[in-house]
Amino acid sequence: GDGGAGGSRKMSTSSGGADLGDLGTVTITKRRFHELLLAEATQLASVRQTSVSIEMMRRFGTNPTLDTLITSARFLYRELPVRYAIRAKEFETAPSWIKCKPFKQISDLYLECFLELRSSPEPSSARAEEQLCQMLTKHKDRLACVVDILSEGTKELMERGLNKAEEEYLHTTLDRFFTARIGTSVITAQHLALHEDVVDGKREGWVGALQLDCSPAKVFQDAAMNVSQLCQREMGMAPEFEIKGHTDVTFPYFPDHIHYIGCEILKNSFKATIEQSKMFEEDQNFQLPPVEIVVGSSHKKQYEDVVVMIRDRGGGVPTKRMPRVWKYTYSTAERPENKRAYHPHQQSDMRRGILAGMGFGMPLSRLYARFFGGDMEMCSLAGIGCASYVRLKRLGGREQAEQAVSTNRLHSNVSNDHMSEYADSPRNPYGKY
């Protein structure tokens, strides 16, 4: 290759390149290789993602071995570029009014992950699988700032001014983006956890990041304790909390999802309860009312959904504001007055206080609940308080793969014939059960 191109690179069929027949490999410049990968990203952005389910992951990872890891690694090697490409092109193909600097940074972050993964060989050994895990961990850290960056981008768009149609488009785009992001996080975290199971020994009651006897009562209790500590630190006080109902119910689930949902709802409930109490500051006998957490589930029906109710006495949400609770453009928290520069490879602390979700907490929580077939609702009793209901799918043996987003194709009319390596063969390593 020429010196201006920065050296050369080999491309082979084993790394996902074009079918070269008997040639095997060809040598191309790094610049040309980079151009080909960018073109491939555009093509892969039109390929449908592979849906997975909790039951599939449970069966596949029950007794993980090195062969299990390599099979899973090869799946991720083919699947993640598709997901990264879709995310990278999400805002690039959006209308011009949405293309602010933060959203451009999101595209760059995912494209960087795509290029790194597609520039590496397909894993076929223990060493290669280990290297993939190191890369996935780096990607996980790199993308950890995505929510904060999108929050800043949303703020910037709102300051410019959005009409109703534009705001709805933004909401739909963010819903689609974050739902797909959850899916990518699930399959990545599951592989990394399975790797640890094989290397360090399998944990009892777990299959990777999936807890077989996940207790929503215990997870919500942990979330409530965490939020209580935040309130004590930031507001000087915190209401008590009570956990009632069917506290012994367990089922296979990802506890991190439940914990995120619990923290976001409880942050709102605890904060509202404290602020509402200011009305009674002169009443020496007044005590902060507790926040109630009630778990409900039928013990007789194995597949009955589990519902968790979080009820507070924080004064409720005004009726006219209720439709906006699930919007990314709505928040009761104050926006930071001073704009700060942020680096896409660092965790951002732009948000003013951990208790402030900046409008993303509730809609993101609902996406986490919906991802595996559940849902989330909120009711408000004006002047009294709110009750939030989180419905979790007790999956058992029922496949929930269809709940994963499969409408992420940016160009639904594009033929995938030329991408048969991806479109015509199932990339699902878990098999059909």
Image (spheres, rainbow, N blue to C red):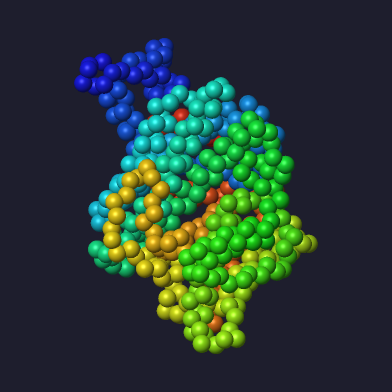
Q: Residue at x 45, y 42 (%)?
A: 141
Q: Residue at x 33, y 41 (%)?
A: 108
Q: Position of residue 388 (x, y in %)?
A: 56, 70
Is residue 411 visible in the rendered structure shown here?
Answer: no
Q: Residue at x 38, y 45 (%)?
A: 346
In the displayed structure, would residue 379 be above or below residue 176?
below
Q: Position of residue 372 (x, y in %)?
A: 58, 53
Left or right? Give the position of 292 relative to 245: left
Is residue 346 visible in the rendered structure shown here?
Answer: yes
Q: Residue at x 55, y 41 (%)?
A: 189
User: Which residue is more in the foreground, 361 or 174?
Assistant: 361
Question: Which residue is farthest top?
Answer: 22
In the displayed structure, would residue 101 be above or below residue 422?
below
For the C terminus, the quadrant is: top right
Q: Position of residue 230 (x, y in %)?
A: 52, 62
Left or right? Give the position of 192 relative to 215: left
The answer to which image quadrant residue 6 occupies is top left
The answer to which image quadrant residue 27 occupies is top left
For the N terminus, the quadrant is: top left
Q: Position of residue 248 (x, y in %)?
A: 75, 60
Left or right? Give the position of 231 relative to 9: right
Question: Which residue is farthest right?
Answer: 300
Question: Which residue is farthest bottom?
Answer: 283
Left or right? Give the position of 130 relative to 151: right
The answer to which image quadrant residue 238 occupies is bottom right
